[in-house]
Image (cartoon, rainbow, N blue to C red):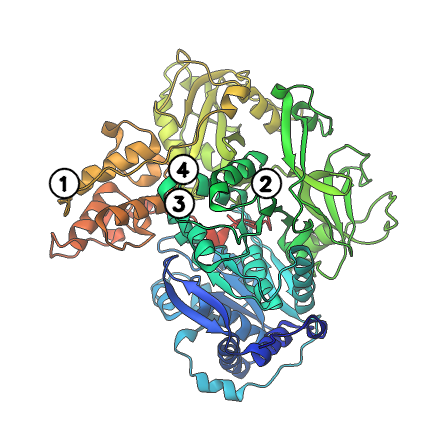
């Protein structure tokens, strides 16, 4: 059955029109298939069923006078979320997607969203609501909302639905940007924005109704929502979805789904491709057929040439073709996509001088030591202008000069930030002081990203405000530095810097900090490392890669006292900082000044990532003691610690266990004991002893109930070890996947 021609798409002006057209033309055809564990089909929706669900939810919202009002969506990844999203649109309401908070996790970000959006109604799943009700007494913002669980909604309500009066200018979505600890801002995205950007993506990707896709991207952020859910609906192509955590647990599941369903289009942030190389075995790869995968987009974080090369080489025997790689650039403020390339074009690479880049100049590299290979992110869409601008003078930069990327107004440009007129004016209403583009008086979006153009190709080189992107999530150095400062009394206030270095194509977090003078003589470096690792893990869900403690007064600063983070990074790599203690994530926990010197930049580039380690074998039905030792051995191998240094009573946070390692622990365990386990196991039971006790009951060794997490350890020891991929940066991805908003 014809699911809608390109001519009929030209008549579509809202997402309600779009789904209505699909339901009328191909109602019973599958729209979305959901793999609950990343492998098994647990739910599916046809176009007609999706519309019926949306109409039932919309009728309920309309009875609550929600037209034109923000409505919070709080769902785990799945098809209920998609139905609720369209239910908002079918009621003329404004959808506000958010990720469900983990147990014992701070609700600060969610509360900020609720307060800013001024939502009065929240849609969710009954399982999420049950968990949140326990926290209503302590969180007044949650309690005042009118909560509706849509998984048990009366489908007969669909008969009461009345189409709302909608135009392309009506808001459809508040897309809250992710950050590390900053207050989130809601990007106002209209129906017209979403339809226009969907058409733009289709122009770049050239997908058709005969295409098919697979996505594990968080559905709460722009790449997962606009690219993974709305784009297949726009072209009428089936989509297979899985939870982000299923991918993190076992990256092979993503490739397996592409192979099984013959997907043509799929992608994610750069780190996802690295994980597939690192975390799949030759035996697993033999079972894959990737011949159909003709567009593998990469965005949300810097795209790395070595990542593309490793992935293409590794999976060439399975039929993956290098020209399938599709680097692109976008962000929530432009709905999603800004630049792209012809579908079959090879990625554009440019090798330039690293030292020249440090001075915002683009010059060909003279030798291998000084070279850096950049990956182009495509060219601008035809209906907008890209301009590289000096962020100080607001004038266009000369050729071969790095500046801030500005994007001119188009139908994809969002309306600004909800209830934030000051930020809106600063970000969305910039004007050039001088121009050769012919658009001097036109408003531009200031992206905050740095880059340059060559022959129309955009190369992104960094962030104006020193934003760091680690595993697709956004982090500001200042936030990390403020977390580290109170971690130990030996650290001198206001005298530290956070930055990243690239190790095997991955961004790794480094902290350098001055030591208070009175601590220099008897410095306990190991105690400082332990305190800093724990603080970073607990507050930011990050794994620290290196910590260098510096002589008092030696941190590079400007004459006015501002920290020079770039000089800190260069000095760290060149061993030019006055270090009194240096630690790095390596087989040896720490090293003092008498240990081998820190690697040079060339050597640092060759440091191998953590190896993919097979978990130690377990007997058929391991005893609690054997399980405990297994956990200790696994942690020791993964974190590169001697087993005797793993204390079974200490929280995982003290060892800097990051989110990816946390879900890998669950996957390794359940594969070893052949029992399904919650992906948040290491979060709910945050010590070796707590996990071992839980498993003892799970395997039938004990009849008495295992202590709940709050009983097992003090509340101060609870932390969220699972990266809310849902909280990917705009790249998180921008959110892991972010984000690409970024």
Is residue 619 shown above or below 611?
below
Label 3 vs 2, first from the N-terminus: 3
Crowd band around label 3 with a 10 angstrom C-alpha radius: few (<14), some (14–19), many (20+):
few
**Residue 416 point in image, percent of width and height:** 68, 58
Q: Secondary structure at mark 3?
A: helix
**Nearest the eye: 437 or 6:** 6
Mark nearer the viewer, 1 or 4: 1
Question: Which mark, residue 625?
Answer: 1
Is residue 518 shown above or below 18?
above
Mark pair 2, 1: CA separation: 45 Å
Crowd band around label 2 with a 10 angstrom C-alpha radius: few (<14), some (14–19), many (20+):
many
Mark nearer the viewer, 2 or 4: 2
Q: Are marks 3 and 2 in contact (CB under 8 Å)?
A: no
Crowd band around label 4 with a 10 angstrom C-alpha radius: few (<14), some (14–19), many (20+):
many
Label 1 vs 3, first from the N-terminus: 3
Mark pair 1, 4: CA separation: 30 Å
Is residue 231 shown above or below 18?
above
State left or right for residue 347 relative to residue 122: right
Q: Are marks 2 and 4 in contact (CB under 8 Å)?
A: no
Mark pair 2, 4: CA separation: 29 Å
Mark nearer the viewer, 2 or 1: 2
Q: Are marks 2 and 1 in contact (CB under 8 Å)?
A: no
Q: Secondary structure at mark 2?
A: loop
Question: Which mark, residue 286?
Answer: 3
Crowd band around label 1 with a 10 angstrom C-alpha radius: few (<14), some (14–19), many (20+):
few
User: Which residue lies under the disc numbered 2?
Assistant: 303
Label 2 vs 1, first from the N-terminus: 2
């Amino acid at each position: 059955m014809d699911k809608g021609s390109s001519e009929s798409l030209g008549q579509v002006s809202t997402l309600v029109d779009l789904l209505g057209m699909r339901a009328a033309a191909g109602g019973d055809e599958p729209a979305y298939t959901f793999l609950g564990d990343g492998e098994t089909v647990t739910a599916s929706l046809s176009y007609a069923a999706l519309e019926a669900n949306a109409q039932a939810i919309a009728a309920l919202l309309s009875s609550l006078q929600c037209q034109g009002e923000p409505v919070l969506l709080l769902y785990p990844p799945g098809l209920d979320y998609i139905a609720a999203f369209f239910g908002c649109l079918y009621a003329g309401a404004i959808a506000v997607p958010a990720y469900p908070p983990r147990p014992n996790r701070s609700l600060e970000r969610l509360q900020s969203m609720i307060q800013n959006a001024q939502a009065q109604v929240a849609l969710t799943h009954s399982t999420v609501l049950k968990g949140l009700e326990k926290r209503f007494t302590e969180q007044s913002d949650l309690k005042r909302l009118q909560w509706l669980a849509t998984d048990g909604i009366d489908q007969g309500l669909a008969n009461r639905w009345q189409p709302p009066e909608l135009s392309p200018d009506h808001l459809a979505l508040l897309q809250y940007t992710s950050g590390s600890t900053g207050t989130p801002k809601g990007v106002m995205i209209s129906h017209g924005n979403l339809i226009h950007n969907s058409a733009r993506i289709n122009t770049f990707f050239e997908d058709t109704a005969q295409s098919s896709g697979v996505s594990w991207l968080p559905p709460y952020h722009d790449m997962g929502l606009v690219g993974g859910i709305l784009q297949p609906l726009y072209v009428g192509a089936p989509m297979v979805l899985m939870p982000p955590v299923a991918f993190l647990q076992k990256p092979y599941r993503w490739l397996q789904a592409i192979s099984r369903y013959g997907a043509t289009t799929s992608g994610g942030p750069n780190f996802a491709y690295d994980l597939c190389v690192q975390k799949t075995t030759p035996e697993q790869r033999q079972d894959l057929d990737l011949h159909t995968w003709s567009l593998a987009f990469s965005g949300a974080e810097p795209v790395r040439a070595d990542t593309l090369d490793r992935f293409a080489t590794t999976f060439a025997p399975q039929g993956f073709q290098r020209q399938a790689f599709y680097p692109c650039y976008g962000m929530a403020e432009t709905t999603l996509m800004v630049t792209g390339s012809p579908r079959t074009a090879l990625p554009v690479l440019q090798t330039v001088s690293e030292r020249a880049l440090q001075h915002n100049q683009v010059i060909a590299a003279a030798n291998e030591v000084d070279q850096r290979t950049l990956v182009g992110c495509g060219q601008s869409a035809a209906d907008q202008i890209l301009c590289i601008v000096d962020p100080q003078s607001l004038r266009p930069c000369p050729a071969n000069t790095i500046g801030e990327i500005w994007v001119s107004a188009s139908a994809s440009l969002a309306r600004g930030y909800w209830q934030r007129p000051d930020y809106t004016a600063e970000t969305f209403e910039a004007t050039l002081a001088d121009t050769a583009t012919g658009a001097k008086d036109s408003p531009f979006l200031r992206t905050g990203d740095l880059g340059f153009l060559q022959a129309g190709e955009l190369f992104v080189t960094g962030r104006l405000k020193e934003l760091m992107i680690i595993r697709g999530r956004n982090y500001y150095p200042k936030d990390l530095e403020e977390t580290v400062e109170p971690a130990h009394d030996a650290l001198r206030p206001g005298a530290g810097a956070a930055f990243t270095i690239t190790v095997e194509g991955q961004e790794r977090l480094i902290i350098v900090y001055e030591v208070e003078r009175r601590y220099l003589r008897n410095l306990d470096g190991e105690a400082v490392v332990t305190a800093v690792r724990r603080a970073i893990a607990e507050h930011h869900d990050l794994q620290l890669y290196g910590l260098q403690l510096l002589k008092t007064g030696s941190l590079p600063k400007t004459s006015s006292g501002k920290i020079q983070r770039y000089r800190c990074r260069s000095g760290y790599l060149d061993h030019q900082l006055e270090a009194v203690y240096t630690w790095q994530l390596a087989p040896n926990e720490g090293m003092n000044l008498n240990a081998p010197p820190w690697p040079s930049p060339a050597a640092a580039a060759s440091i191998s990532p953590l190896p993919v380690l097979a978990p130690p074998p377990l007997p058929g039905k391991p005893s609690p003691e054997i399980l405990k030792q297994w956990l200790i051995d696994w942690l020791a191998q993964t974190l590169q610690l001697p087993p005797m240094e793993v204390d079974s009573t200490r929280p995982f946070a003290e060892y800097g266990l990051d989110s990816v390692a946390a879900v890998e622990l669950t996957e390794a365990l359940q594969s070893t004991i052949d029992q399904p386990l919650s992906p948040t196991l290491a979060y709910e039971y945050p010590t070796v002893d707590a996990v071992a006790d839980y498993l003892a009951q799970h395997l039938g060794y004990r009849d008495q109930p295992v202590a709940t997490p709050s009983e097992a350890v003090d509340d101060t020891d609870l932390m969220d070890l699972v990266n809310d991929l849902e909280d990917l940066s705009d790249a998180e991805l921008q959110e892991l996947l972010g984000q690409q908003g970024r």
